[in-house]
Amino acid sequence: MATLKSVKAKSPQDLVVKTNEALKKYDQKSTKSVDETAKLLDAMKNVLYGSAKGKNEEPTADIIGAVAQEAYKVSLLSMLIQKIELVGFESKKDIVQIFNKLLRREISMRFPTVEHICTQPEILSTLVRGYDDQKKQIDALNYGMMLRECIKQEPLAKVIVHDETLFDQFFVYVQTTTFDVAADAFTSFKELLTTHKILSADFLEKNYDRVFTKYKELLNSDNYVTRRQSLKLLGELLLDRANFTIMTKYISDPENLKTMMNMLRDESKNIQFEAFHVFKVFVANPNKTDPILQILLKNKTKLIEFLTRFHESRSDDEQFADEKTYLIDQIKDLKLK
């Protein structure tokens, strides 16, 4: 276990400077460079988390503050994420822990590291683009862990959603051919749209056409996992009270209703089930638009027959059975205005 003494650092501030310099000069082909950087990163992790041999000591706020202030001064956070792809496996883990610990630093309801990152937009850009195809899987997942820690902080989530180019990259990354990377990207995408409800609702309302045009591509994806995850997230978004305006707009579009009706007949039972939870919002809406009402009336008999047989194997699921019965009754009662 590396300590200040073992890496010949005079103070926490000195450790930050030495680590930053080691990363700047990092050479994968040099055993000395690799070993020195690994020891410095390990030492910094131990300073921040208070790990000491045989002890369980929490670091003081002063020590964490000293590391943080020097890190801001020398732009260490930016250097850490730039070099994470080059360092060894254990050093990658240390970088994630160091970054996330500094990010969570709080002083009197303020988050100084969050404020610092807001002035360094390339940090968030690098983290989001960590899902690029050319990145190694392990690096993409490490970027994802740091990105989600950033997304927990509303000011940083706001920076991402307000950067059109950056936000739209998620529609590409969630369809990456590497399963684990695509799944991780979708987790980050979901947290971006659900963690800060008012921010998300305001963003979706102002960018409705752009976002939902791209979202439709996810629902029509050839990738089963992408379609299922996107459909499930859509259901969550529409049923969240904070998104009432978005929900009203979405369920007023007959094209969206047609999409859900087609997905109810998908060959995948799971896709059908998730589509049901979106479809029920269209039917339950007491203020249906004329185009929506016309589609439902035109297919009234077929829908009743279809829903009666729909997922009969879920007979033990009382909530689903009740919802299905409710929808059938609603469709039976449909009339022209």
Image (cartoon, rainbow, N blue to C red):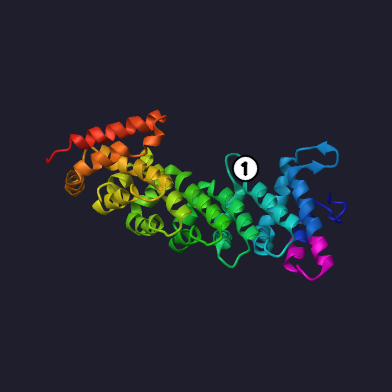
Q: Which residue is labeled 1 in the image?
A: 106
Quadrant (top left/top right/bottom left/bottom right) for the C terminus: top left
Give x and y (percent) for residue 61: 71, 41
- Label 1, residues with CA under 10 Å away: few <14, some 14-19, many ≥20: some
Q: Is residue 158 left or right of residue 324?
A: right
- Is residue 85 visible in the rendered structure shown here? yes
Could you tell me residue 124's position as x and y percent?
56, 58
Q: Main secondary structure of the magenta part?
A: helix
Magenta-drawn segment:
20-37
Which residue is at a point 54% across and 47% down the rendered structure image?
Answer: 153
Q: Position of residue 320 (x, y in %)?
A: 37, 33
The total of numbered circles placed on residues is 1
Measuring 33% from the left and 49% from the top, which residue is drawn there?
Answer: 265
Residue 21 is one of the magenta-drawn residues: yes
Q: Is residue 122 visible?
A: no
Nearer to me, 43 or 72:
43
Q: Secondary structure at mark 1?
A: loop
Q: Residue furthest left?
A: 337
What's the residue at 41%, 59% (across, down)?
A: 221
With 290 as the anchor, is 57 left or right in this view?
Answer: right
Amino acid at pointer 1: Glu
Is residue 4 left or right of 241 when viewed as pictured?
Answer: right
Residue 36 rendering spot, x and y as whole percentages: 82, 61
Residue 176 counted in the magenta span: no
- Camera-nearest residue between 181 and 270: 270
Give the residue drawn at x 52%, y 61%.
176
